Image (cartoon, grey):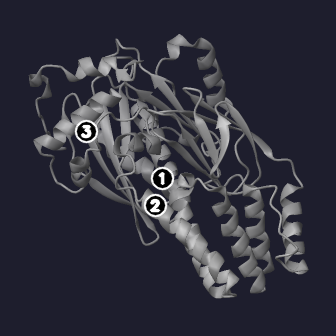
Amino acid sequence: MRAKILGISLVLVLVLLPSSWALGGGEKAFITVLPLPSKNVPLSIQDQVLAAIARQLRKQYGARVLSGRAVGRAVWGTFGSGLKEASMRFISRVSEGKQAYQQLRVGRTLKKMEAALRYQQLCGPEIRNPALFTDLHVFAGLAHLAGGKQDKAMAAFRQAVSHDPGLVLSRRRFPPDVVNTFTRAKRQLLSNQPTQVSIVSRPAGAEVYMDGKLQGTTPVAAPLYPGRHFVRVELEGYSPWTLSLPDDFPPKEIKALLVPLWSGDPPKELLAKAIAVEEFAEPEMAQLRLLAGFFRANALVLASLSQNGRNTHLGIRLLVVEPEIATRARLFNLGSDPGEYNRKVRGVVGTLKDLRRVRGLKLADNSEPFGGENPDRDLFRPMDESRDHDREKKLKRIRNSGPDWYESWWFWTIVGGVVVAGGVTGLTVWLMQPEESWTLVIQPPP
């Protein structure tokens, strides 16, 4: 069902700022949403919440916004994310599930494959072996069929074929009734034409992996059938761009414009204190200033997602660069219903009152306190609209008549400086400002 909350087409766009642009300059303020690593939050939920934060910042404060998991990974890498651990456990559970089926232990097979599915939600785009995806669903389907659950077996087989349309079951290895059930599920899925998904990136020439299989380098097209899919776009010197596609019809186009990697080591000390401490000490403030300089941001929004049972918790903290304000962290319970996340995030973003003091901020002119009657239909604007009038006209048409946010989900990504020979020229100059410009001013909220 296309109207499901997770029925999304994610588009991430990178715009490099001109070297003459300075902090606080330009027509609008620029806010970076920097996600902290999340260990146990499904990728689809991370994407949804980060998109909602960015959209509401745009709607309520009229600012340009950078957000998305690739932004966090550019700074933290895999540190603290649990991606490596989840990948190892996914691989292990699939192997154990196959072994259990071969030992005719149907209950154990289902238990292991259900665990593998949970880990897949956390690490899907990290997996490079395509056979793991098909093995997961084929053996889950076989176990369901052995337990007399025909519908669940058919669903698992369809998902396996979605990953590999050429998949067949050998009649030498499996009995006729099993092969016939698999063949019927495969025929159901392949009865309709696949969606031809175009994947482009900026810069071009990035490697694209779909469900662990290399598709080529951007621009590239791949035929996709309905089902859960995992996309990974890689280019040396840039943060891996990943996407977990939902369990319905895939989008026709995916645009991945890549975020340059943070040049230093992950600021682990900041990560440990970002949400936990009441006030930042000077070392943490210095790291935040460096990050704001790297992204050329007027403000940083630190976002931390965690799971507490079925509930998703959002920790959020704001650094305004000029005048310098570091707010205290706040924790919000978004609940267990993804359909409610956008409404709750709208209220969370409304609490970031100190953003109104950002130099260069032009508040959105909306009669509604949270950005108008239909904020979900808004798309984010590019940083430099004046340089491409045709693009702006196209965007206006999209804004006026475009689909809902979960069908066209845009992150306008802005990274500071002009990249020359692997370095960021404008960033170097900015970070060499006189020491007195880093005066610490913490003003508690009124």
Kindly identify the amino acid type of the residue bearing the numbered disc 3: Leu
In this view, the residue in front, 350 or 235, is 235
Q: Tell me the residue at 76%/85% (across/down).
A: 146
Tags 1 and 2 touching, CB below 8 Å: yes
Mark number displayed over residue 41: 2
User: For mark 2, does the 10 Å Cα neighbourhood hold few (<14), some (14 to 19), or many (20 or more) residues?
Assistant: some
Q: CA distance from mark 2 to mark 3?
A: 24 Å
Q: Tell me the residue at 49%/44% (across/down).
A: 51
User: For mark 3, does the 10 Å Cα neighbourhood hold few (<14), some (14 to 19), or many (20 or more) residues?
Assistant: many
Residue 413, given in percent of the width and then of the height, sits at 47, 31
Kindly identify the amino acid type of the residue bearing the numbered disc 1: Gln
Secondary structure type for disc 3: strand
Kindly identify the amino acid type of the residue bearing the numbered disc 2: Val
Q: Please, is residue 313 above or below residue 428 in the view?
A: below
User: For mark 1, does the 10 Å Cα neighbourhood hold few (<14), some (14 to 19), or many (20 or more) residues?
Assistant: some
Decide if residue 223 is on the left or right side of residue 333.
right
Q: What residue is pinned by disc 3?
A: 319
In this view, the residue in front, 45 or 370, is 45
Q: What residue is pinned by disc 1?
A: 46
